[in-house]
Image (cartoon, rainbow, N blue to C red):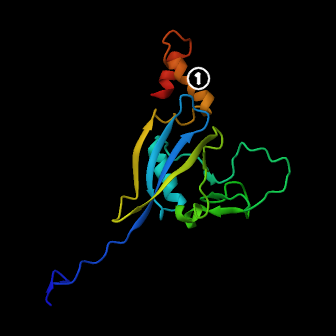
Amino acid sequence: MAAVNGRMVGMPPPAQQASTVLRLRVAIIGSEPEIWRQLEVDADLCLTDLHDVLQIAFGWRDSHLHSFTDHDPFSPQHQLPRIGRPPRTWAPDDPYGDDEEVLPESEWTLAQVFDGFDGPLFYLYDFGDGWIHLIELVERIVEEQKAPKAVLLRGERRGPLEDSGGIAGYFEKLDILSNPQHPEHNVIAGWVR
């Protein structure tokens, strides 16, 4: 056998390593009509990378704090004992203070987060405006060849404007912008520009 371009002739090519891709559907809770995106992301991405992907997919500017949690923020607690695994929260640094229960998002891959857990996962962005994204695991896909780290497949409606006052403030601003006769139209149009 002879070597050509660093590979032995007559030998099979090296096997491509399969990768796991997660198809996710991400929607901003409370948006009506719904603002959503469908993504395919490499399961080896860490939550810090998913944060970056979500920022791009929704047109955010990454100018506010964020966190991830697998606990429904709308679920009442009622001080009842929880059965099963305790809820988890991940953040880049501990934005809540000195909370030992907040996990470092840079150390957790999506494969680890979704290991034995099919979701949903919640992404909280801008704690003041309170943008809560519902992340649903639609499908796990094994790719024979290395796929891109993240792909935006589809979605509907543009992402909300930063600092627009949460979902209610955003839709109020859209209503004002759609009505040139509204007394605040010029002010809001200037703010958007």
Q: Nearer the viewer, residue 161 or 152?
A: 152
**Is 79 on the left-hand or right-hand side of 91?**
right
Residue 56 in the image: x percent, y percent? 44, 46
Taking 111 as reference, is 150 above or below it?
above
Q: Residue at x 59, y 56 (%)?
A: 118
Q: Amino acid at mark 1?
A: Glu
Q: From this viewpoint, which residue is outermost toward the bottom?
A: 1
**Is 32 on the left-hand or right-hand side of 98?**
left
Taking 179 as reference, is 173 above or below it?
below
Q: From this viewpoint, which residue is outermost toward the right?
A: 79
**Is 169 on the left-hand or right-hand side of 57?**
right
Q: Quadrant of residue 141?
A: bottom left
Secondary structure, mark 1, is helix
Q: Quadrant of the C terminus?
A: top left
Q: Quadrant of residue 47?
A: bottom right
Q: Nearer the viewer, residue 143 or 65?
A: 143
Q: Residue at x 24, y 77 (%)?
A: 13
What residue is pinned by disc 1? 172
Q: Residue at x 15, y 90 (%)?
A: 1
Taking 4 as reference, is 27 above or below it?
above
- Determine crowd level at label 1: few under 14, some 14-19, many 20+ residues with C-alpha closer than 10 A: some
Residue 58 in the image: x percent, y percent? 48, 41
Taking 118 as reference, is 6 above or below it?
below
Residue 180 in the image: x percent, y percent? 48, 12
